[in-house]
Image: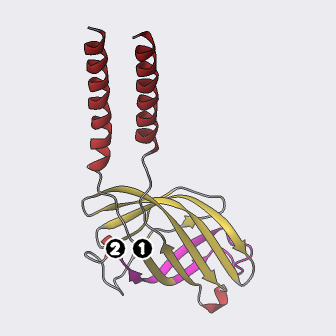
């Protein structure tokens, strides 16, 4: 009788685990890289003191790969939201959109800032075209505003990130199941 209860408990834990992993398998995350370039008007005449982009101009796709290829072409125009406040870091919904994708910028961090160069990195979420919202990293670079505020934006690396909640739940269930099995076997 004890072994039947043990088998039933392990089977139930197996169904719960399958339910968690089945949800994750249904996710269709975005994989790929995309790069833009264009003009930017900053809030000051010096990149050393800039804290925001007041306006973007003539922004186009420079390159793309992965899932972006089916929906976006090189030189497609990109809609940019402005103003974009990068210092302090400011959540910016729909910072950019192109080819049915849109990007919500979550965080930004100024990595390097002087009179001639600005480098900002951060995280955000891209969504669209039937894919699940997918987190990823990005970078923004700009050269001296006297060079017409030329900038480039790239979402680099894949956008896939693991679902931490599901991973933690599966680990917890596994540990509980192992402890339960250890206690049951030690009483037999």
Residue positioned 31% across, 17% down in the render:
6
The magenta stretch spans residue 89: no
Few, some or many residues within 10 Å of mark 1 (<14, 14–19, 20+):
many
User: Which mark is on residue 33?
Assistant: 1
> By what rule are the colours in the image chosen?
secondary structure
Residue positioned 52% across, 84% down in the render:
39
Q: Percent position (x, y) of residue 86?
A: 61, 64
Mark positioned earlier in the residue sequence (2 or 1): 1
Residue positioned 41% across, 29% down in the render:
173
Residue 29 vertical position relative to residue 186 in the rendered view, above or below: below
**Magenta residues, dominant SS class:** strand
Is residue 144 something that shows in the picture?
A: yes
Residue 180 location, quadrant: top left
Query: Could you tell me how many numbered marks the image carries?
Result: 2
Q: Front-most of 45 and 97?
A: 97
Element under disc 2: helix
Q: Front-most of 110 and 65?
A: 65
User: Which mark is on residue 78?
Assistant: none
Residue assigned mark 2 = 66
Element under disc 1: loop
Residue 38 vertical position relative to residue 68 in the rendered view, above or below: below
Q: Percent position (x, y) of residue 16?
A: 30, 30
What is the magenta range?
A: 39-65
Label 1 near label 2: C-beta < 8 Å?
Answer: yes
Residue 12 location, quadrant: top left
Is residue 93 something that shows in the picture?
A: no
Q: Percent position (x, y) of residue 99?
A: 29, 73
Few, some or many residues within 10 Å of mark 2 (<14, 14–19, 20+):
few
Quadrant position of the N terminus in the picture: top left
Residue positioned 34% across, 73% down in the render:
66
């Amino acid at each position: 009788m004890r072994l039947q209860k043990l088998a039933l408990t392990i089977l139930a834990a197996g169904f719960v685990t399958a339910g968690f992993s089945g949800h994750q398998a249904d996710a269709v995350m975005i994989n790929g890289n995309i790069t833009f370039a264009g003009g930017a008007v900053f809030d000051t005449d010096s990149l050393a003191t800039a804290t925001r982009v007041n306006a973007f101009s003539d922004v186009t796709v420079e390159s793309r790969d992965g899932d972006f290829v089916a929906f976006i072409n090189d030189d497609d125009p990109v809609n940019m939201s402005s103003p974009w406040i990068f210092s302090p870091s400011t959540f910016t919904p729909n910072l950019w959109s192109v080819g049915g994708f849109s990007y919500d910028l979550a965080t930004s961090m100024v990595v390097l800032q002087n009179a001639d160069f600005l480098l900002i990195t951060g995280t955000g979420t891209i969504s669209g075209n039937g894919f699940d919202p997918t987190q990823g990293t990005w970078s923004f670079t700009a050269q001296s505003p006297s060079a017409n505020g030329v900038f480039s934006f790239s979402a680099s690396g894949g956008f896939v990130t693991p679902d931490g909640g599901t991973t933690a739940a599966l680990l917890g269930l596994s540990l509980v199941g192992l402890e339960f099995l250890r206690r049951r076997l030690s009483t037999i």
